[in-house]
Amino acid sequence: MSRRALEVAPELLGCVLWADGVGVRLVEVEAYEGADDPASHAWRGPSGRNEVMFGEAGHLYVYQMHGHACCNIVCGPTGVASAVLVRAGEVVAGVERARERRPGVRDAWLARGPGNLTRALGLAAADNGAPLLGGGRVRLEAGSPPTAVGRGPRVNVSRAWERDWRFTDPSSASVSALKLHANARTPRPAGR
């Protein structure tokens, strides 16, 4: 069943994303709501780059940014771009393989940040559109939900950054630091 990213995002915390023998327990995610969200890749509508976001729920949207891959879990109904960016996780299986991909990094940071997470998992552009439900190379499974859920602004986006659409497991050392984009501005108080 498909639902909007804002509903799905906090429920993904604690789930385990698997790829290539590595399992990562999700501890930080961000919701992106397509046409209703100027920070979304799908804000201006479908394109060759973002067409997976407009597809069937339960697939992986992988894209390149700043020289590394990032991944989103598509969750909206077909035709409506709604997806959750997977920002950080804890490696719970295949730690040796993750260490090979991220040498010299302490274990808590192996999958800290969206590019580091995809690198630890061995995800690449070829995984764009991969189904997550089933027994494929890339899959999403239920895990241990956090005892509490943190919520706050999204990391390093220049538009709609102030929306509290970032969800975290506050007890995890793998959650990335909040970094505001250089163009993010503090909203003015009402009446000014």
Image (spheres, grey):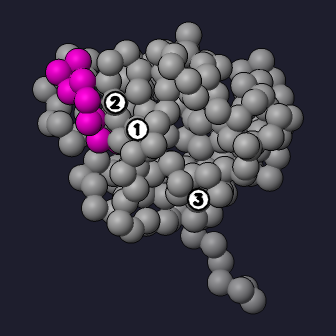
Helix, strand, or loop for circle 1?
strand
Q: Nearer the viewer, mark 3 or mark 1?
A: 1
Q: Residues within 10 Å of mark 2 (few under 14, many from 20)?
A: many
Q: Position of residue 179 (x, y in %)?
A: 42, 53
Q: Is residue 38 magenta?
A: no
Q: Are marks 2 and 3 in contact (CB under 8 Å)?
A: no
> Mark 2 or mark 3: which comes first in sequence?
2
> Residue at point 65% right, 20% down?
129
Mark 3 lies on residue: 165
Helix, strand, or loop for circle 3?
loop
> Residue at point 49% right, 40% down?
86
Q: Main secondary structure of the magenta part?
A: strand
Q: Are marks 1 and 2 in contact (CB under 8 Å)?
A: yes
> Residue at point 37% right, 23% down?
121
**Residue 182 in view here:** no
Where are the magenta residues, as a range?
A: 87-97
> Mark 1 or mark 2: which comes first in sequence?
1
Mark 2 lies on residue: 23
Between 100 and 183, the residue placed more toward the observer is: 100
Q: Position of residue 53 (x, y in %)?
A: 72, 32
